[in-house]
Image: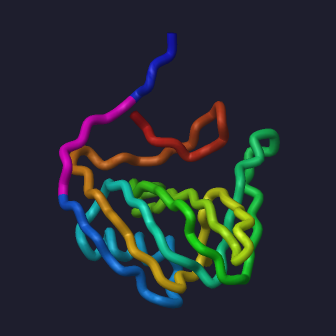
Amino acid sequence: MDTIRHATFETGRCMLGRLPHGKDLVGTIEEFCAQNGIQTGVFSVMGAVTSVTLGSYDQNQQVYVTYKKEEPLEIVACTGNVSFKDGKLAVHAHAILADISGQTIGGHVFSETLVYAGEIYFRELLGKPLERKYDEITGLLLWQL
């Protein structure tokens, strides 16, 4: 029987922050981690964006299909993690967003996703940093555990 492959971490710093207006969400989190020496962590974000680039993974073609919305959207939920991909820090985030009438969209968050206002809760994890590598079965870059 298959089981969950996992790694164990100690809890590091727990941080709350305000995201800068007009900046890319993904790039800002990557920069924050680099500046603070964070190699692995998890986060959640609340706030709003002025535009978003989202995507979903086409399992048949094994590629991400992305689209961009350029309108004010509320971040209903956004969660993610930070690890390494190709030797560099990489943010992996998913979000659900709502327009002014409450209609929602969601998916994998890509750059350029521009923050209107936002708050982040970040939990640093201490241990051997996780590295994403190509997975033959899915075609995705998954953690090597």
Q: Position of residue 111 (x, y in %)?
A: 59, 73
Write down the quadrant of residue 12 in the picture: bottom left
Q: Quadrant of the C terminus?
A: top left
Residue occupying the far front of the picture:
101
Residue 145 position (above or below residue 84): above
Q: Nearer the viewer, residue 64 or 42?
A: 42
Residue ID at (46%, 19%):
3
Q: How many marks?
A: 0
Q: Quadrant of residue 67?
A: bottom right
In the image, residue 71 lies at what x, y percent? 71, 83
In terms of depth relative to the viewer, which is nearer, 45 or 82? Answer: 45
134 to the left or right of 101: left
Task: Spot the residue most to the top.
Answer: 1
Residue ranking furthest to the right: 60
Q: Which residues are magenta?
A: 6-12
Residue reaching furthest bottom? 22
Nearer the observer, 109 or 88: 109
Is 23 situated left or right of 109 in this image? left
What residue is at 53 percent from the left and 85 percent from the top? 116
Can you give x and y, in whole percent of width and height, for residue 63 in the image?
Answer: 74, 51
The colour scheme of the drawn protein is rainbow
Corner quadrant of residue 43: bottom left
Q: Is residue 106 magenta?
A: no
Residue in the image at 66% along x and 57% along y = 107
Residue 39 drawn above or below residue 26: above
Provide residue 75's location: percent of width, then percent of height. Answer: 56, 69
95 left or right, relative to 10: right
Vertical arrangement, residue 19 with respect to residue 45, above or below: below
Identity of the residue drawn at 47% across and 47% down:
132
Q: Is residue 9 magenta?
A: yes
Q: Is 42 situated above or below 9?
A: below
